[in-house]
Amino acid sequence: MKSLLLLALGLARTVVLGARIEAERIVVSVRPYKREQRRCPVCGRACDFYDMANRGAPRLWRAMDLARSACYLEYAPCRVRCPEHGVRTEAVPWARHGARFTRDFEDWVAWLAVRCTASAVSELARVEWHSVGGVCRRVYAELEAARGASRFDGVRRIGIDETSYKKGHKYVTVVVDHDRGCLIWAHEGTGKDVLNLFLDELTREQRRAIEVVTADGARWIRQLVKRRCPNARWVMDPFHVVQWMNDALDAVRCEEWNAARAAARAARPRPEGKRGRPAKGELPPEEVRALEEEAASIKGSRYALVKNPEDLTDGQRARLEALKKRAGSRLVRAWELKEDLRAVFRAADGSEAAELLDDWMHRAAYCKIAKVVAVEKKVRRRRDDIIAAVELGISNGRVEAINNKIKVTVRMGYGFRNTDNLVALLMLRCGDCQPQPPGSPGEGEEEGREGSEERCCLG
């Protein structure tokens, strides 16, 4: 019977003393092996006895369910005096330090949390929803410690960005490793102080090993990275460059729409002594209807202008062709400059990109469209960084994909009050340390073999 309980609960280095049923739960009395008792929970060394924790009262640890009934492990731990870490409650082999859940139970909850909402995990595991965040923190800390090396080792190309996680301009700063395609650091807030926290965690050698940094056009990120990562090459994200031009193009569209609408309003005849709308059935003159149709076509052309030509629908393509027929249109000139800027990032190499970009900047500077000229000034300041994006063939697209996962995580959790829990869940979901369910292959062959031998001895 005791061997069956050990197998069902996945316990190793543990002796079962007995079991009882209390109401709707099962309580199993256990104790560690003699050689596993009185060990420091931090360093694991055997220590001297200090006193009984909680005056000798037994504690309960939530374990995996047995036959649809909640199961708890019962044990009265003592406190030990560690020469290095002082007085601590002794470690137990079935649970992590500071947890009231068994190791297998926490692994199972963390695996579910990566794939389900916190409320669904809480209902399925029958724990409080705020306990899920603490479980994720402990599981991630153990996975990170078991890695054996820093997650920043070997980092050569990184992407930096900020994304909102809550209303009221609440942001989280994220750093992504382009080579591994995973999240390596996240922290609440934005600005130089927050990014400095990431750079402070890197050693001098790790900072000097960074070769490429991608980000948006924020000057403070560039200045800070250039100062603390001297060997890094700054790369301007192509998406943000084209987005600048798309925003300018949409602003020009609004100006053209307002001008066309004003022209149609001014062309409408207004008889003396008559004000307000025209009477029912009274049609405006032909030229007024043409101006109104032109204003309406400009108003509905936003997506036809900003979308890639190859992605346009038939209706959007027809609307764009109608706009092109307008001779001397500022809107069409701005659209052509937007497409020419996109062509820079399709260049075969850096020299071709430099030639195309210089030609674009010359034409944009003299186009007499204020919004486009403002974009040209921003592009000119970042010319070398834009060419570097073409030479290296890299962008911030992977970072934007991680940002989308972050927003999905926040939406699944209906928001997070504790950002530490959010960061721990993000590192489990978007990092390279993925939690495994209990009993899965590769969970630790040596520990599994040792546990099997011990269970066989008990049998």
Image (spheres, helix red, strand yellow):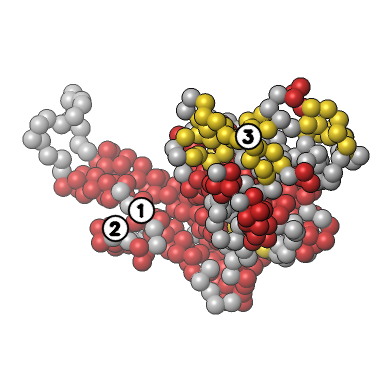
The local secondary structure at tag 3 comes to strand
**Where 358 falls versus 173 (above or below)?**
below
Q: Name the residue under label 3.
A: 29
In the rendered view of the protein, which quadrant contains the N terminus? top right
Side of 30 where 347 appears, left or right: left
Compute the Cα span from label 2 to label 3: 71 Å
Front one among 234 and 301: 234
Q: Name the residue under label 2.
A: 316
- Looking at the rendered structure, the kind of residue marked 2 is Gln
The local secondary structure at tag 2 comes to helix
Compute the Cα span from label 3 to label 1: 67 Å
Q: Mark 1 points at which residue?
A: 303
- Looking at the rendered structure, the kind of residue marked 1 is Tyr
Query: Residue 313 in the image: x percent, y percent?
Result: 28, 60
Asked whether residue 318 appears in the rendered view, the answer is no
Residues at discs 3 and 1 in contact (Cβ within 8 Å): no
- Looking at the rendered structure, the kind of residue marked 3 is Ser
